[in-house]
């Protein structure tokens, strides 16, 4: 009897947490596209890089791009979250032939990828270079260094990219799509 009560209590608690989280996510705008290179974020980055003497930014700017393309476009916080996800990856693989479907998984896709289809719910994917990225899962977080075309059909997901802003299509709701 005590086990049944504990199980019921755990289910109710989980349902309340899920409902609160979903309500919080859905209360946000249905689409948020932020490109710091076009907005105030562009002005913030040079200030951080030019704390030293004026000649310092020239040598510092090429170094991250040449050594680590992701570091050049992600904010410090986003880069830290990306690194944490890479360390927590349950699967590391080259570009897959079919869609990713492992719900709840943290997946690292290494190297160039002409087409990446993500049908993962409540998971995370970290990718390098993707020509065409389609996210059909919901509640999923994606970090991609460079993406040319991004299509999102799921809801309550977040996609962050480091390169130029891709051609975007968002058919879902409560998604956050942003650079860096």
Image (cartoon, rainbow, N blue to C red):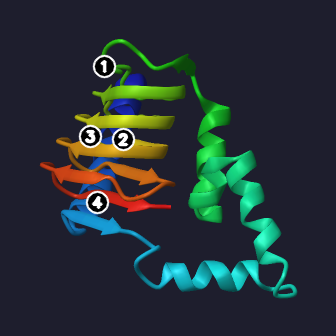
Q: Residue furthest top?
A: 97
Visible residue check, residue 145: yes
Residue topped by disc 2: 140
- Of the image marks 4 and 3, the number of the one nearer the N terminus: 4
Q: CA distance from mark 1 to mark 3?
A: 14 Å
In contact (CB < 8 Å): disc 1 and disc 3: no
Residue 71, horizontal then vertical, whole percent: 66, 55
Residue 125, horizontal then vertical, whole percent: 46, 35
In contact (CB < 8 Å): disc 2 and disc 4: no
Q: Which of these two is toward me, 14 or 54?
A: 54
- The circle drawn on residue 25 is 4
Residue 178, compared with residue 4, is above or below; it is below
Residue topped by disc 1: 99
- Of the image marks 4 and 1, the number of the one nearer the N terminus: 4
Residue 158, horizontal then vertical, whole percent: 36, 51
Q: CA distance from mark 3 to mark 2?
A: 5 Å
- Of the image marks 2 and 4, the number of the one nearer the N terminus: 4
In contact (CB < 8 Å): disc 3 and disc 2: yes
Is residue 62 toward the left or the right of residue 141 in the image? Answer: right
Q: CA distance from mark 2 to mark 1?
A: 14 Å
Label 2 SS: loop
Label 1 SS: loop
Label 3 SS: loop
Q: Quadrant of residue 25?
A: bottom left
Q: Quadrant of residue 142?
A: top left
């Amino acid at each position: 009897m005590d086990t049944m009560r504990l199980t019921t209590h755990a289910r109710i608690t989980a349902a309340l947490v899920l409902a609160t989280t979903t309500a919080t996510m859905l209360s946000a705008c249905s689409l948020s596209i932020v490109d710091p290179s076009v907005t105030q974020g562009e002005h913030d980055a040079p200030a951080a890089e030019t704390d030293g003497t004026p000649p310092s930014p020239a040598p510092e700017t090429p170094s991250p791009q040449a050594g680590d393309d992701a570091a050049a476009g992600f904010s410090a916080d986003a880069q830290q979250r990306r690194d944490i996800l890479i360390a927590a990856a349950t699967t590391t693989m080259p570009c897959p032939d079919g869609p990713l479907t492992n719900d709840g998984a943290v997946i690292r896709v290494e190297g160039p990828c002409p087409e990446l289809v993500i049908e993962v719910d409540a998971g995370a994917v970290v990718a390098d270079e993707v020509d065409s990225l389609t996210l059909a899962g919901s509640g999923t977080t994606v970090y991609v260094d460079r993406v040319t075309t991004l299509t999102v059909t799921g809801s309550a997901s977040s996609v962050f990219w480091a390169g130029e802003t891709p051609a975007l299509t968002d058919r879902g709701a409560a998604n956050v799509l942003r650079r860096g």
